[in-house]
């Protein structure tokens, strides 16, 4: 029997911001274990932190955002969304699927973004070094 190909997904959810970081971490671990238990593979987990919401959700003005990228069988999405609906800690959620073209475009974008950030950091370091050298040269010059 051949192994069925898994699809690539990203799920983002908002947790009530009154929770401490440890509680948010436990919620993230809960869903990471959920994916492992249901045969999905977690690729990346990002905690974006507390953000102000565009509008109040359940009378809350802020929330903690979490994004999890994973591969898995499409059947896991129904189970995941049911778990989100039953979890009172989750204010909102969104799960999206990536096709091959979108995934390739996204990866190219992320590589370019990383390269640009690296170049900016190198340029800033070079400018800081030049500034330090100019300061040393100015200090070494005798005053009249």
Image (cartoon, helix red, strand yellow):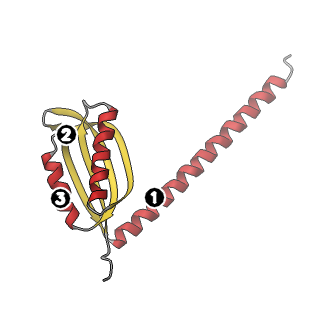
| x and y, in percent, of residue 86 in the image | 13, 47
Q: Residue at x 45, y 58 (%)?
A: 110
- Cα–Cα gap, marks 3 and 2: 17 Å
Label 3 secondary element: helix
The nearer-to-camera label among 3 and 2 is: 3
- Measure how far apart labels 2 and 1 are at the Cα level: 31 Å
Mark positioned earlier in the residue sequence (3 or 2) = 3
Q: Residue at x 22, y 53 (%)?
A: 94
Residue 79 located left or right of residue 71: left
Number of other residues with Cα within 10 Å of mark 1, as a class: few under 14, some 14 to 19, many 20 or more: few
Q: Quadrant of residue 40?
A: bottom left
Numbered disc total:
3
Q: Which residue is mark 2?
A: 89
In the picture of the structure, the residue carrying the numbered disc 3 is 79
Q: Gap between marks 1 and 3, in whole Å?
A: 30 Å
Element type at mark 1 = helix
Badge 3 vs badge 2, beta-carbon distance below 8 Å: no
The N terminus lies in which quarter of the figure?
bottom left
Q: Residue furthest top?
A: 144
Closer to the camera in the image, 75 or 56: 75
Which residue position is annotated with label 1? Answer: 110
């Amino acid at each position: 029997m051949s192994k069925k190909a898994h699809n690539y997904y990203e799920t983002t959810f908002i947790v009530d911001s009154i929770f401490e970081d440890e509680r948010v971490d436990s919620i993230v671990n809960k869903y990471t274990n959920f994916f492992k238990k249901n045969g999905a593979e977690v690729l990346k987990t990002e905690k974006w932190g507390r953000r102000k919401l565009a509008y109040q959700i359940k009378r809350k003005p802020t929330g903690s955002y979490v994004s999890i990228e994973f591969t898995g069988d499409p059947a896991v999405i129904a189970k995941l969304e049911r778990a989100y609906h039953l979890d009172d800690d989750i204010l909102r959620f969104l799960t999206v699927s990536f096709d091959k073209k979108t995934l390739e475009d996204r990866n190219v974008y992320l590589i370019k973004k990383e390269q640009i950030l690296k170049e900016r950091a190198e340029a800033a370091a070079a400018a800081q070094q030049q500034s330090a050298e100019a300061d040393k040269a100015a200090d070494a010059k005798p005053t009249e």
